[in-house]
Amino acid sequence: MWSDTGHNIKKCDSKSSYPSNATLESVLLPFIVLWTIVLLMAFDQVRTKTINSFAGPYIAIGHKFDTCPSDRTIEVLIRVSHFNPSRPYDLQTISGNLSLKEDMKDNYWSRVDLAVRSNNQWKENAFVLNFPRLGCSAIREHAPDFFRILAKHTGAPTDKATPCVIPSGVYVLKNESVSWTFPNFPVIPYGRYRFRVMSRSTSTSRTPVLCLEVECEAIPKP
């Protein structure tokens, strides 16, 4: 198994304890994303029967977004449209709402647990990633088109010279076309992934302010 703290990846024994620092997103979240940052890390063992190449230029697909236990200070409820493999360059759309009881800045401790789909089952904790003192900027930097949608609805600044803040509030998204592109990582391993993002207000907080589970996939560009 591999683990990441901040930006340095190191190999570790699967029985060792996780690093103490923990926060989001990305996601994501992220998200985010999200989320999203998890897909940018390489896996030695990711292969599928239907995809011959191991890694390369890719199209990212979002399949499913679910919430997991948290105090709901930040809650992301998103539905993603079906991906049409016969028209792979058509953008997916997202609908749903984003609820923030406090401003999202770069003050969260985020942890990402990532599972890899292999032999018709999930390999849990293939990666464990920890991001101290990150949040809004991570989404803006690594998932710019998703952040564009957030900025459109929340007024969050897209200028990287401006401190990143997503204001508190409830925001409704409806059929927003999104490009799941991550410009800092033009090549990643192909495969199906599931990652859980948990963000806390401090490194020692027991209850996450955000918890989001995302199932997604990276396929070769035609």
Image: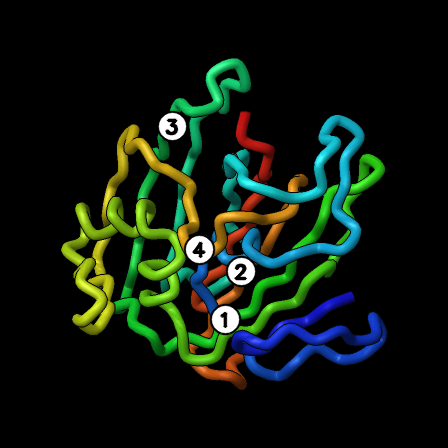
Task: Check if mark 3's residue and mark 1's residue have beta carbons within 8 Å.
Answer: no
Q: Secondary structure at mark 2?
A: strand
Mark 1 → mark 4, Cα distance in angstroms: 10 Å
Q: Nearer the viewer, residue 88 or 23?
A: 88
Q: Earlier in the sequence, mark 3 or mark 2?
A: 3
Q: Which residue does the image show at 38% across and 68% down from the upper left?
A: 135
Q: Nearer the viewer, residue 65 or 5?
A: 5
Task: Check if mark 2's residue and mark 4's residue have beta carbons within 8 Å.
Answer: yes
Q: Earlier in the sequence, mark 1 or mark 2?
A: 1
Q: Secondary structure at mark 3?
A: loop
The amino acid beneath tag 1 is: Ser
Mark 4 → mark 3, Cα distance in angstroms: 18 Å
Q: Which residue does the image show at 79% across and 41% down from the upper left?
A: 118
Mark 2 → mark 4, Cα distance in angstroms: 7 Å
Which residue is denoted by mark 1 in the rendering?
110
Pick the quarter of the image with the C terminus.
Answer: top right
Residue 140 coordinates in the image, percent (x, y): 31, 59
Which residue is denoted by mark 2 in the rendering?
197
Pick the quarter of the image with the N terminus.
Answer: bottom right
Task: Check if mark 1's residue and mark 2's residue have beta carbons within 8 Å.
Answer: yes
Which residue is denoted by mark 4 in the rendering?
32
Mark 3 → mark 2, Cα distance in angstroms: 24 Å
Q: Which residue does the image show at 72% across and 48% down from the upper left?
A: 116
Mark 3 Cα-neighbour bin, 10 Å: few <14, some 14–19, many ≥20? some
Q: Earlier in the sequence, mark 3 or mark 1?
A: 3
